[in-house]
Image: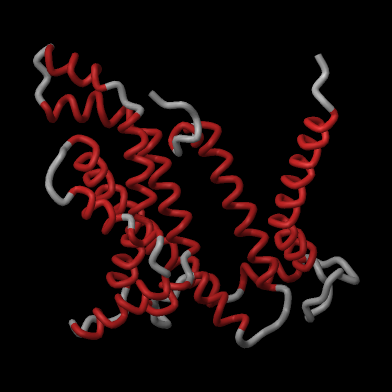
Amino acid sequence: MRRPLSHRLLGLAGKIAVGLVVAFILLPAVVVTMSAFNDKAIMNFPPTGFSTRWFARAFSYSDFSSGFRNGLIVTAFASTIALVVGTGFAFVLDRYEFRGKKAMEAILTSPLVIPHFTIGLGFLILAAQIHAARGFAVVVVTHVVLVLPFVMRSVYVSLRNLDARLELAAASLGARPGRTLFTITLPLLLPGLVSGWLFAAILSFNEFTASLFVTAQATQTLPVAMYNYVREYADPTLAALSVVYIVVTALLLTIANRFLGLGKVLNVEHGR
């Protein structure tokens, strides 16, 4: 039975609208990618020639190299600490009922709605009050606060999809709580744990707004180094570096989705 003409037109209009939205979202990436291969030292679009020299400059510029190294240090510590802390809070929120649970959950997820520049400025003021230098410790703590909600979300959804009868079966066979945790619970939560760490790492490495307040010259991350670069130069080097960002992030998410199933972890597929 054929659908009425009005339904078919409505479906076609919906597909066109979705296509336009996707094109609007991808348009900046397309423009940046084309500009990265410009042969001139002035940003212009469309490019008049083809060159890859800006990619070479992006990889050889010293501030970008140090910013990349600092970013890896901050990301490794921040995402790992957030994974441990976020997993603990996810367990508490999922397994226990207590007074103030909603308030604690709201506080832990507040970085999702609080502007990042507010968090960065707050940690800058706090560091000044306790006479702490803007070293790696301040940057890492700031990033932990920012990425913690994403780790909690990933682990919490995995906990909700976990069959509690498996833990009960292990306990009924004499397994102690610690052994049940390390042999049953954590292995089953591994996709959520890895996904949470991966999202935290990507967000931490790309964080700019809060990092601008809490980093110094010796601790500036790559996004901050990019910001300082664009204040002095106007060539397509940043466009080339942005293309590398886009490609690497897309590859990481594709690999994670292939081996971990991000749809289930993010609860966009049907859970239990």
| 15 to 74, vertically: above or below | above
| 115 to 20, vertically: above or below | below
Q: Write down the quadrant of residue 140 in the picture.
A: bottom left
Q: Write down the quadrant of residue 56 in the picture.
A: bottom right
Q: What colouring method underlies this structural image?
A: secondary structure
Q: Position of residue 2 (x, y in %)?
A: 83, 18
Q: Residue at x 44, y 47 (%)?
A: 198
Please state, as top left, top right, bottom left or bottom right, where the N terminus lies in the image: top right
Q: Residue at x 71, y 60 (%)?
A: 29
Q: Is residue 148 left or right of residue 69?
A: left
Q: Write down the quadrant of residue 11 in the picture.
A: top right
| 209 to 29, vertically: above or below | below
Q: Residue at x 83, y 77 (%)?
A: 40
Q: Is residue 21 left or right of residue 172?
A: right
Q: Position of residue 230 (x, y in %)?
A: 62, 81
Please state, as top left, top right, bottom left or bottom right, where the C terminus lies in the image: top left
Q: What number of labels is visible?
A: 0
Q: Residue at x 29, y 66 (%)?
A: 141
Q: Is residue 54 left or right of residue 266?
A: right
| 265 to 34, vertically: above or below | above
Q: Position of residue 146 (x, y in %)?
A: 37, 61
Towards the viewer: 195 or 51: 195
In the rendered image, the residue lying farthest to the bottom is 232
Q: Position of residue 201 (x, y in %)?
A: 43, 54
